[in-house]
Image: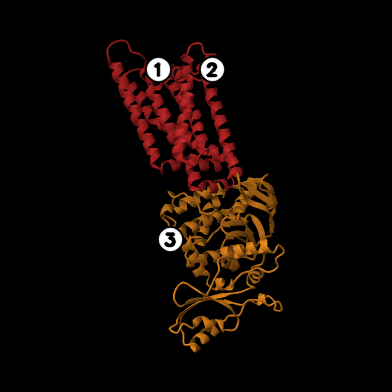
Chain colours: A orange, B red
Amino acid sequence: MIKVEHLRKSYAATIAVDDISFEVGEHEIIGFLGPNGAGKSTTLKVLTCSHAASSGRVSIDGKDVFEDPEGVKSVIGYLPENVPLYPELRVREYLTYRAGLKGVPKKNRATAIEKVISRCHLESVQDRIIGQLSKGYRQRTGLADALLADPKILILDEPTVGLDPNQIRDVRELIKELGKERTVILSSHILPEVEAVCSRVIIINKGRLVGQGKPAELRTRLNQKSAAIDVEVIDPKNVAQKVFEALDGVKEVQVKDAPGAFRIVQASPADDPNSTPSAVTDIREAIFDAAVAGGLKLIAMQMHTQSLEEIFVEIITQESETSAATTVDSTNVSAATEEAPAETQNREASK
Amino acid sequence: MNMFWQIRREFAAFFYSPVAYVVIGAGALLNSVMFYLIILFLSQSGPAPGAPMEMLFSWVLFWLVVLILTPLITMRSFAEEKHSGTLETLITAPISETRIVLAKYLSCLAFYTIMWVPTLLYPIILMRYASIDVGPVLSGYVGTFGIGVMLTAVGILCSVATRNQIVAALVTFAVMMALFLGGLFRWVDGLAAQSFFEYIDLMGHMEDFAKGIVDTRRLVYYGSVAVLAIFASVQMLSSRRWNG
């Protein structure tokens, strides 16, 4: 369905995408994962004929993006990164205009618009002016536009950025549903999102393809080494550090800035050459018991989740240190999955 | 079909912005003042310097209207879409760059034409009180339209080149002034290319059009500049794909 060969794209002085090749089959949902500035958007822009590649070949549905851009564009529904819309139009007006522009035949136009409006739950705002809509509704308007011409391929650049957790869940459900009858490519820097939605993941960093595979494979790869737990205790006798260090499976106890706050780093199975790669065991229960036994009052405990950017930093340093790296250094990523909405919110806040 | 659809939207888009009303209002006001002055001058005793509509189309004030208001019509066409990012949604719709440029150009030209509609009242008013020669009035409008064909194309090109509407308007104004002032070199004696400057002298052109002389060489000139500017706009819009 989509075939990318040795794609390179450079702007004046910077190389945004450097020799990326991949293929996407029919009815696949592909996640494009990478930190900000990795070249995700650039790749998607080349796929949608918005930008031209510096070299390499891209063909979509058998058509070359360079030779037949209109043919390619007619099978793609595209949601650009910041969802550009005409703020002065009403939702329905905008969709009507876009339907005409995309060549939806006049007799089908009304039905097509009704369909996307109900699909993206825009009924309540269809007669409102886009400029006055909340970010969530604008995102959905953009998504509705992408779906208008019933495209075979849907390309969504960061479709859930700026949405609240409920909306994120809705959009993910919608994407999954859409993936049943078409090919979807979405970009994201949020690992749990990609895990929840995509059948296959392509990771890029600094314009290069770092890895690709099914989310589960990726997770074990990232999940082998160690996990950390942040705790806060009331510790009148000042014994907390010793109590935690004595625990089974603890590698290190770091003292944090706040009084009574520690980070307990678990020893990872990967440190032991005899163990098979697997996720680390959950020692939260043991921590609780040890705290009680040691006379500490445990007031907070949380798995430390690492952002994808941090994981990437580690992947990259790891890769440059040991060129033929087999293990990926990372802490507990599964925790991030459990706390997907919270993590997403943190990201929004930190932006 | 697609194309007409887009022109309609582009044309409607003018009226979502206050610029449209300002342009039409200012155009109507300036032309009315001009018409009023002409009537006052012609009411003075002594020989009449020309027919009222002839004066309307060849006075300096006519150029003030054209040179100031045309950049305001074309400035938003691409600059605004670039600025807000909607150009990307437009480009990724299954339509060619040529079509995008043409739709925007034709809607600007339509708006330019609409700007002159209020002046149609003047010959109607004049007809009530005197007999007027319809030919020169028509040729005056032909010239006005021809100049619009050229200048709106120039404006589109300037708007493609930038993402800032003000810059687009100022550059358009500068280029138009260059085209306009270039023609005035014809009055400098002894210049080698004097006949060239005479050929591009817009003011001279309008004087002729206002007298009823429709010189097709001039229309060809306007058309050529327009085609060139539109072609350059399409190229520039396509090159966006390479330069980001």
Q: What element carries label 2?
A: helix
Location of residue A196 with respect to A46 vertically, above or below: below
Residue at mark 1 to residue at mark 3: CA–CA distance: 59 Å
Q: Residue shown at 27%/12% (left/top)?
A: B45
Q: Which residue position is annotated with label 2?
A: B196
- For disc 1, the chain is B
Residue B181 locus on image (x, y percent): 46, 22
Residue B199 visible at all: yes
Q: Is mark 1 on a helix, strand or loop?
A: loop
Residue at mark 2 to residue at mark 3: CA–CA distance: 63 Å
Q: Which amino acid does label 2 sit on?
A: Phe
Left or right: residue B35 compared with residue B227 = left
Residue A339 locus on image (x, y percent): 52, 72
Residue B1 visible at all: no
Q: Do labels 2 and 3 share a chain?
A: no
Q: Nearer the viewer, residue A51 or A10?
A: A10
Q: What residue type is labelled 1?
A: Asp
Residue B130 locus on image (x, y percent): 33, 18
Q: What element carries label 3?
A: helix
Residue B68 locus on image (x, y percent): 41, 30
Q: Which residue position is annotated with label 3?
A: A124
- For disc 2, the chain is B
Location of residue A151 with respect to B187 vertically, above or below: below
Are there few (<14), some (14-19), or many (20+) residues within 10 Å of tag 3?
A: few
Residue at mark 1 to residue at mark 2: CA–CA distance: 32 Å
Q: Which residue position is annotated with label 1?
A: B133
Question: Looking at the figure, which quarter contains the C terminus of chain B?
Answer: top right
Are there few (<14), some (14-19), or many (20+) residues within 10 Å of tag 2?
A: some
